[in-house]
Amino acid sequence: MICIRKKDNTLRAVWVVIAIAAWFARDPLHLVVSNAAESHLLIRLAVYSCVYVIMAGLAIPGAVLLTVLAGPFFGLGPGTIVASFASTAGATIAFSASRRYMFCNVQHHQNDECQSICPGPGKWWLGNSGLGKWELLLLRLTPVMPFFAVNVLAGHSRLSIKQFWLISQVGMLPATYLLVRVGTLVPEAGQVSQTGMLAALWPLLLLGISAWFLRLFVVNGRSSERMTAHRFADTVVQYSLRASRLLMPVLAMVVFAPGCVAQKPNASLAAIYNPLAQRPDYERNPVIVIPGVLGSRLVDDETGKTVWGKYDKIRFRRRQSDDLPAVSLPMRQGVPLSQLRDRVRSDGTLAYLELSVFGIPVELQAYNQILQTLGVGGYRDSSHPRADEFNYGEEHFTCFQFDYDWRRDVAENAALLDKFIAEKREYIRREYASRYGITDAEIKFDIVAHSLGGLLSRYYLRYGSQQLPEDGSLPALDWAGAASVERLVMIGTPNAGSVFAIRDLVNGHQLSRVLPYYPPAALGTMPSIYQMLPRPRHQTLVDAQDPDQAYDFYDPELWRQMKWGLADPDQDAVLQELLPDVAERESRECIALDHQRKCLLKAKQLHQALDIPAAPPPGVTLHLYAGDAIATPAVMSVDTQTGKLEVAKSVPGDDTTTRHSALMSDQPVEAVSTRPASPIHWTSVMFLHTSHRKLTSDPVFTDNVLALLLQSPRYVQSPSNR
């Protein structure tokens, strides 16, 4: 039996508390590290080093991934240096803590054998362990045993701290170089998990988990043969050393072989398109970038506070937003949605989502990738928060970002887009006249729209500034907006809706475990989310017991029976926040059900308007970029007894929008056809093997969208075409 001295219980408890806190802080730490690439170099180095030392010092698995991330963060040379010193510092802390609190603080009251394990106070070396200088160096050179396990077991050795640090610094360098080299081959840090490179490292992670359990055995001093702690450690070391000798040649081949293999060079898009980017702006169409849902910053016009797009604190458990009443739309019974106004307005697109983690400012890239892509082509938007990052020159001024209140009806925002285009057209005409002396230019725009922005743009092309009539009828299809647009590029747009819309309306939504939770009642106030529901004719909502029985999303009675969203009695606490002036619960329920009914009918009306088969006027082209390589939920099943939703079927997509929805196919969701029927007359369609969030950073998208915008001929340019 191995006992722990009582006077060390407090220190041990503190150590355990720190380890538990670090475990629960893994999400904010991940946000800091994964987004530090956008920060200043010194901040990146400080944040990365601190996180690495903490993880390694607490013997938390994951140091391998941090080493890989040093590649895209700092490059091969600097990344190897910072990862090497950070890993050695953390390893030394773990080594010292292991010696102090695991091995040296044990004693046995009846067996003198413990005296050989811990000869006495003040001794910083232990009994005759099998781990010496050369054994430690061999284990460091060959990562057959997880490094954090070596750090812990090395505490049961004769090595001094200085010897351990020096051997670890030198021995871990080759493996560190290898892992950082893997990271440099990844296009960006956010794609590490999507590459095959990380799959080659999973055995190390598996060994790390196994070694974590071995540590528990060592602490308890037990094994199948009831070995003492030091003998068990010696056995682990001996078997690891034998495996190391066998794997040394393999490691050498892995480290040096990449230098002998010819690497396929990547073409520089800037080199291809810079000559085209230098041309004057009047030789190409101006571009408008339209983000999707959540893609515009929302600000309280009265207080100036940002209610969406900036967060000053993180949450370790699910808690709803402190700005819930502000971010939700108002509700009043019998009042049309278009007349329900609040004091919140849009205030620019979210090139970056601002977040404060432990007081460290972190910026999550939102639509910055689209702006970077257009920057390569010379499109310049001076309102971009970091416009000076791109070398546009001084001649380019024809790139604009359309921000809008993404909570509101799509048709309302289409009318604002019409006004925005009219303002920018007059601005460009003035610039043409002052810069080039051109006074009679006919200006048409190219629109690049993501997700919900594609639905908004498509409605604008068809109906211009027309609103959806309050009597439920459809507006006149006159293609009024097409008079101002030549090309519409849609990226990951759910043209046939997404089942994630109903999931969020029923269950609420939380972007991340450290960001606020938005309950169903709050999201249920937003007409735009209903307008992203799938089409009932595609049978995307079926009975859990009878899959042949499909349900109608547009039916308000279905939502009331299933107790979904605003019809959920459990949401009354949220409704009290949203309707503070309504005292009676029954009155709040009536207002909520009335608002839900209006939103569902408005969604049905919009879908009918968008689904009318019609070809755009000559000279207007529609282009789609969508993902089709990830299994994406397409059909939901509902338990009619409980109202619970489950994913019943998944089909190819981008993890958010299915291929079927992006194409707006009129066939069943699982059907495959050589020429799928669609009310949208596509000019071109391109599918990418990436996720919804990564579509705009895919190099294939960048290359092709620039070729489209810069090299495709313009339709209306000469007087003969006017």
Image (cartoon, grey):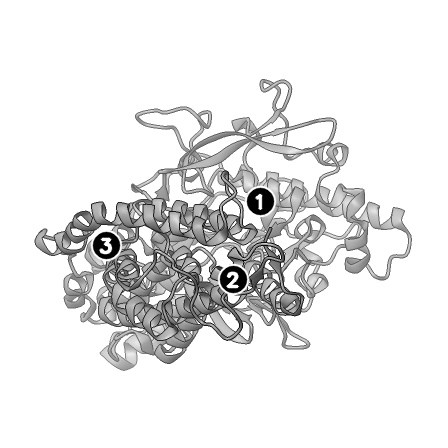
Comes first in the chain, label 1 or label 3:
1
In the picture, the disc for residue 286 is none
Image quadrant where residue 265 sits? bottom left
Three-letter amino acid code at the position of disc 1? Gln
Three-letter amino acid code at the position of disc 2? Gln
Q: Nearer the viewer, mark 3 or mark 2?
A: 2
x then y, percent, for residue 468 = 60, 47
Q: Which of marks 2 and 1 is in front?
A: 2
Residue 428 visible within the image: yes
In the picture, the disc for residue 115 is 2
x then y, percent, for residue 680 = 40, 38
Please report the residue visible at 73 percent of the width from the left and 58 percent of the height from the top.
Answer: 330
x then y, percent, for residue 14 = 62, 68
Image quadrant where residue 555 sits? top right
SS under mark 1: loop
State how far apart marks 3 and 2 are (Cα). 70 Å
> In the rendered view of the protein, which quadrant contains the C terminus?
bottom left
Comes first in the chain, label 2 or label 1:
2
In the picture, the disc for residue 531 is 1
Q: Which of marks 1 and 3 is in front?
A: 3
Foreground: 287 or 515? 515
Please report the residue visible at 51 percent of the width from the left and 68 percent of the height from the top.
Answer: 100
Q: Residues within 10 Å of mark 1 (few under 14, many from 20)?
A: many
Three-letter amino acid code at the position of disc 3? Asp
In the picture, the disc for residue 703 is 3
